Amino acid sequence: MESKSLAELKIYKGEEFAGLLRRRADGGAEFIYDKAYLSQPDTRDLCLTMKKRSEPFIQHGVNLHPYFAGLLPEGLRLKYLLQKIKTSPDDLFSIFAAIGPDCIGDVYAQSNPPKTSADLAALPYWNEINFYDYFLSSIRDSPISDPSGFAGVQEKISASMISLPFATQNKGSYILKLNPKDKQNLVYNEWICLYLAELCGLKVNEYKLIKDRDGDLGLLVKRFDRMIKDRKLIRIHQEDMCQALNLFPAEKYRIPLKDIFSCVQKHTTAPLIEMYHLLKLVVFSYLLGNGDLHAKNISVYESPADGRIGLTPAYDLICTLLYGDQRMALKMDAKDANFNRKDFINFATRFELKKAAIEGAIDDVLRKFRQHHHILFSIPMSENRMNFLAKELTLRMNSLSGNEILPQKSEHKNKAARLVFKR
């Protein structure tokens, strides 16, 4: 049956049938937990905002709850999917019905639980294919009955990166990122930013810069919502901050940073530790000029080993400053630009972080960023853009420390080239 005709969906969490999602006559939807699922003491809540209970969760006005809406694809694949199932962008229920079992995280809709074998169909090695041909074939040829290619695909508001799932030979699940036609250095940009984040002490997942048979670059990033154990694929629960705050994806640039810190403080297992790491991510993003750190680019996940909830590794790190974007995506105390050290200290102390810990986090990121930021100058850019970047990075580092300035841009460029080509 086509997705537009479905009035009820079976919702699974991992391999367990959790409940039913139904369309409502008023255009909304309701989710109700399965009685058997509720009766089992070891079953988990569907998500942070939909705790186990016998009463239904009713969504009025739009036709999906914010958590389910946050599982839908975005960008080019969403446009294709809408054409494929012949529906409108506001028909969220039909879109969710069509995307099948491979949503981000461990919650999905399907008539039966999917296979969990680790021997999933893998693509050819990347040097045997053309990335863009594969991308086009994946959106043209994927049948809706097996739409695993729709998971985790986003076309960023500011960066327009093309992303698609990519399986490697017996090594797990990845996201393959490709340059859009109008920004040929985005893949390299993100690769450098992930590398710089590592050097600055942030946790990131496994990543690799690769080339296809025609020499086009791609960025392969391992998914942290999937793992293979005993030859079985395990789905790991993950929620971005829009989902965790029960807000729709369209709100991702409107959520103040204080709400995200409050959410992490409330829901994580070790809130002081996680807020400390979140502060380092925000400081790093400001120094980097990452204006796309919005609410969907910050997530928490649940450890499959012990159920602890913490921040995911940092992801989708881009120097948007290169494209003239000087403002942060999320406002900190009504500001989205021109931050200084005092701004971060005054903000973070309101969340029970000790001043010494806050200053230690700032200084740790700042020291490492000052030492390694020259690698950003290996990203191809014009002389004018290089001068702009050098000036802006100087201002940002000085605003957090008041110490030394950048070396001359030519030294940065040469030093970056030597270091990157070694890597």
Image: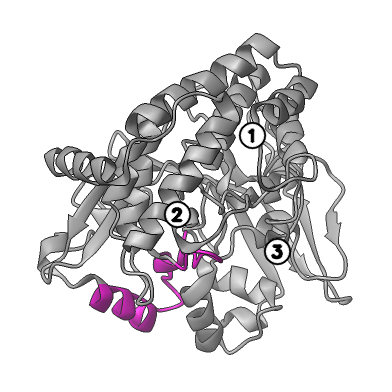
Which residue is disc 2 drawn over?
388
Q: Secondary structure at mark 3?
A: helix
Instruction: Answer left or right for 274 relative to 116.
Output: right
> Toward which corner of the image does residue 230 lie, by quadrant?
top left
Give the Cα separation between the discs numbered 1 and 3: 31 Å
Q: Nearer the viewer, residue 325 or 91?
A: 325
Image quarter in which the N terminus is found: bottom right
Give the Cα separation between the discs numbered 2 and 3: 31 Å
Q: Secondary structure at mark 2?
A: helix
CB within 8 Å, label 1 to label 3: no
* Residue at 70% across, 26% down: 342
Which residue is disc 3 drawn over?
250
Among the two numbered marks 2 and 3 on one chain, the one whose residue lies closer to the N terminus: 3
Label 2: few (<14), some or many (≥20) within 10 Å? some
Amino acid at the residue labelled 2 = Phe
1 vs 3, front mark: 3
> Toward which corner of the image does residue 273 lie, by quadrant?
top right
Which residue is disc 1 drawn over?
43
Give the Cα separation between the discs numbered 2 and 1: 53 Å
Amino acid at the residue labelled 1 = Thr
Where is residue 328 drawn, in percent x and y? 62, 49
Label 3: few (<14), some or many (≥20) within 10 Å? few
Q: Nearer the viewer, residue 133 or 120?
A: 133
Provide the residue span drawn in magenta: 132-160
Label 1: few (<14), some or many (≥20) within 10 Å? some
